[in-house]
Amino acid sequence: MTNQQVIQLVVIGVIACAVLYSMLARRSGPLSLWIQAYMSNGSLSFGQCVTLWWTRKNPEEIVYARIRSQMAGLDIPLEKLVTHSDAKGDLKRVVSAMIAAKGAKLPLTWEEATAKDLAGIDPFAEIAEIVKQQEADKNALSGV
């Protein structure tokens, strides 16, 4: 092996170590995100976490939304979460609205919730208002 080949291998090694360090050492690195998703049954592959992190798609928010939706029994594809995040939507608010709607047995699709969010309407507040109104109606009927 020539000196030039040794230098090339050292440079490649240093670059590989720097990339690995940045992936592993950061709290929001892909390994940390994948461990969070794995431990919470968020069903994300390590490759998906690396892709989110590498493209700087606000991976913490997306992974958190994925974990919350999976834990609530909603199957929202990762692509839809990424698309809404790219559109500058509020994933936390939309996922919260979807979870609340499911709990209240109200029909709310992902498309409706994201459309309302992007239009500046808080879908979670809307669901909360409907539930509040239903409770008031139920109390009025029962005479409480």
Image (cartoon, grey):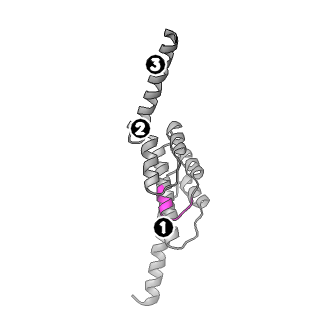
Q: Where is residue 33 drawn, in percent x and y? A: 44, 46
Element type where label 1 sits in the image: helix
Which label sits on residue 10? Answer: 3
Reading the image, the residue beneath label 2 is 24
Quadrant occupied by the C terminus:
bottom left
Q: Which residue of the protein is positioned furthest toward the front in this rendering?
A: 1
Reading the image, the residue beneath label 1 is 100
Q: Disc 2 or 3, which lies upstream in sequence?
A: 3
Q: What residue do we see at 55% from left, 72% from top?
A: 106
Asked if disc 2 and disc 3 are in contact, CB closer than 8 Å, the reply is no
Distance from Cα at disc 2 to Cα at disc 3? 21 Å
Labels 3, 1: front one: 3
Q: Which residue of the protein is positioned furthest toward the bottom in this rendering?
A: 143
Instruction: Determine crowd level at label 2: few under 14, some 14-19, many 20+ residues with C-alpha closer than 10 A.
Output: some
Q: What residue do we see at 52% from left, 42% from top?
A: 52
Amino acid bearing label 1: Ala
Instruction: Determine crowd level at label 1: few under 14, some 14-19, many 20+ residues with C-alpha closer than 10 A.
Output: many
Instruction: Determine crowd level at label 3: few under 14, some 14-19, many 20+ residues with C-alpha closer than 10 A.
Output: few
Q: Disc 3 or 1, which lies upstream in sequence?
A: 3
Element type where label 2 sits in the image: helix
Q: What residue do we see at 44% from left, 57% from top?
A: 40
Distance from Cα at disc 3 to Cα at disc 1? 54 Å
Asked whether residue 80 is drawn in magenta, I would say: no
Labels 2, 3: front one: 3
Q: Which residues are magenta?
A: 67-75
Amino acid bearing label 3: Val
Distance from Cα at disc 1 to Cα at disc 2? 35 Å
Q: Is residue 33 visible?
A: yes
Q: Disc 1 or 2, which lies upstream in sequence?
A: 2
